[in-house]
């Protein structure tokens, strides 16, 4: 949770470190020593370490109940990294170094920690979500970019020659959509081409209509009908899903969970592009607007979709609602279960910002970027119920 809003936390370090109720807010992890010692990590201590204002940010309570710092000189071998987030894991050092340079044994740890009196602990510290809600005000927009990459890892099971793989990957990709993401958003960007793994499909082919046409989560056919591979074995399929599909959806779900926990709302922008010169799977209409705004009433008020269409018009772009594509991504944990998750899709016609033959950007890219930035701002500021 802390890592998602680390920018805001660092920007407000002075406020947090000076206000007792914020300074003493518990950080995400309570770390327990295997023999019962507890180190309670607090926000003020973390921020003093991140901003290099204090060498020993870790404090706990020793056997006498005194507030004390733990000297962070080195890592204990075998410490359970799963007990804390990655930032905490890098910072925590739980066994103090003795004066002669030798390491203290684990059983000597509590004896060698000296009491350190700082200031009275706040009687009513805020929770971490309360701290973040106070300094961030609104949730960041989560931008899902599943199809921008053209990277094809080796040994992914494709049977066509490498040069053909790269050609298909470039023409299949939503090129440059990763460059459209405005600053200040959470970006969830797939690292591989959609011809390797398509994170926008259901992982179970039985649930995915496109799988019958060879365009399931592990595609067997390209957009132009080219055979990419035979059906993968269960072993290869599972490996690809674990490596590329599951992390993408885990990041998307985690970002949604964090924003719901803190702000009771989450905003998702599902960012795509589509070709004007040929059809791709998922087309539900015949129109070819500059911008297709996809949504479902359960997860996006129609007024918001119409506001985004008006935004497109201000930038000289035509727009249609749910035509030629419809819907928008929502993590399955929340799909049609939690209306606090607002999700809207933007499908940008590729000819608006690139040459579809050479695949090079043109001057329209700046217009599209300005539109996406304003659309994101509208989504960011849309009032929660």
Image (cartoon, rainbow, N blue to C red):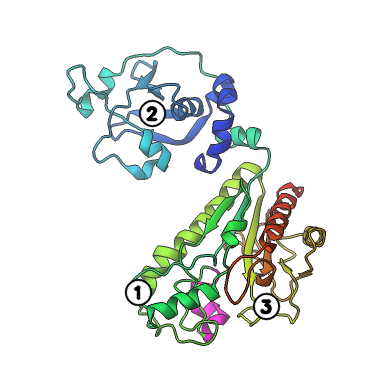
Tell me, yes or no, whether the highlighted magenta stretch contains residue 32.
no
From what the image shows, is residue 153 above or below residue 251? below
The secondary structure type at the circle numbered 1 is: helix
Could you tell me how far apart the alpha carbons at marks 3 and 2 are, in whole angstroms? 59 Å
Task: Give residue 28's position: percent from left, percent from top.
Answer: 48, 37
The secondary structure type at the circle numbered 3 is: loop
From what the image shows, is residue 140 above or below residue 293? above
Sequence-earlier tag: 1 or 3: 1
Residue at screen point 50% across, 55% down: 251
Residue 336 appears anywhere in the view? yes
From what the image shows, is residue 274 above or below residue 308? below
From what the image shows, is residue 230 above or below residue 240? below
Find residue 39 and name its label.
2
Could you tell me how far apart the alpha carbons at marks 1 and 2 are, in whole angstroms? 43 Å
Q: Nearer the viewer, mark 1 or mark 3?
A: 3
- Identify the image quadrant of residue 355: bottom right
């Amino acid at each position: 949770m802390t890592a998602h809003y680390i920018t805001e936390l660092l920007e407000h370090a002075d406020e947090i470190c000076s206000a007792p109720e914020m300074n003493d807010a518990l950080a995400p992890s309570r770390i327990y020593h295997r023999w019962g010692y507890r180190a309670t990590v607090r926000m003020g201590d973390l921020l003093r370490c991140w901003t290099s204002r204090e060498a020993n940010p870790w404090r706990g309570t020793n056997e006498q109940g005194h507030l004390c710092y733990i000297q962070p000189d080195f890592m204990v071998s075998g410490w359970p990294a799963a007990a804390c987030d990655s930032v905490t894991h890098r910072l925590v050092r739980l066994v103090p170094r003795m004066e002669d340079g030798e390491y203290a044994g684990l059983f000597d740890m509590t004896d060698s920690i000296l009491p350190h009196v700082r200031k009275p602990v706040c009687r009513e510290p805020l929770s971490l979500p309360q701290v973040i809600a106070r300094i961030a005000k609104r949730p960041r927009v989560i931008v899902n970019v599943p199809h921008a990459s053209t990277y094809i890892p080796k040994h992914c099971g494709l049977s066509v020659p490498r040069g053909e793989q790269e050609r298909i990957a470039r023409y299949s990709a939503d090129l440059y959509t990763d460059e459209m993401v405005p600053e200040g958003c959470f970006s969830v960007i797939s690292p591989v081409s959609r011809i390797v793994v398509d994170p926008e499909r259901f992982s179970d082919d039985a649930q995915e209509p496109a799988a019958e046409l060879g365009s399931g989560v592990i595609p067997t056919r390209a957009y132009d009908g080219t055979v990419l591979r035979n059906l993968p074995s269960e072993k290869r399929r599972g490996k690809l899903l674990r490596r590329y599909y599951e992390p993408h959806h885990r990041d998307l779900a985690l970002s949604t969970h964090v924003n719901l926990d803190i702000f009771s709302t989450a905003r998702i922008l599902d960012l795509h592009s589509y070709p004007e010169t040929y059809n791709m799977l998922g087309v539900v209409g015949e129109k070819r607007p500059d911008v297709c705004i996809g949504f479902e009433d359960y997860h996006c008020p129609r007024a918001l979709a119409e506001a985004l269409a008006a935004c497109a018009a201000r930038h000289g772009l035509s727009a249609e609602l749910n035509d030629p594509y419809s819907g928008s991504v929502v993590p399955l944990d929340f799909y049609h279960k939690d209306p606090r998750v607002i999700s809207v899709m933007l499908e940008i016609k590729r000819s608006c910002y690139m040459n579809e033959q050479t695949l090079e950007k043109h001057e329209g890219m700046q217009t599209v970027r300005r539109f996406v930035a304003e659309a994101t701002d509208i989504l960011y500021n849309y009032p929660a119920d």
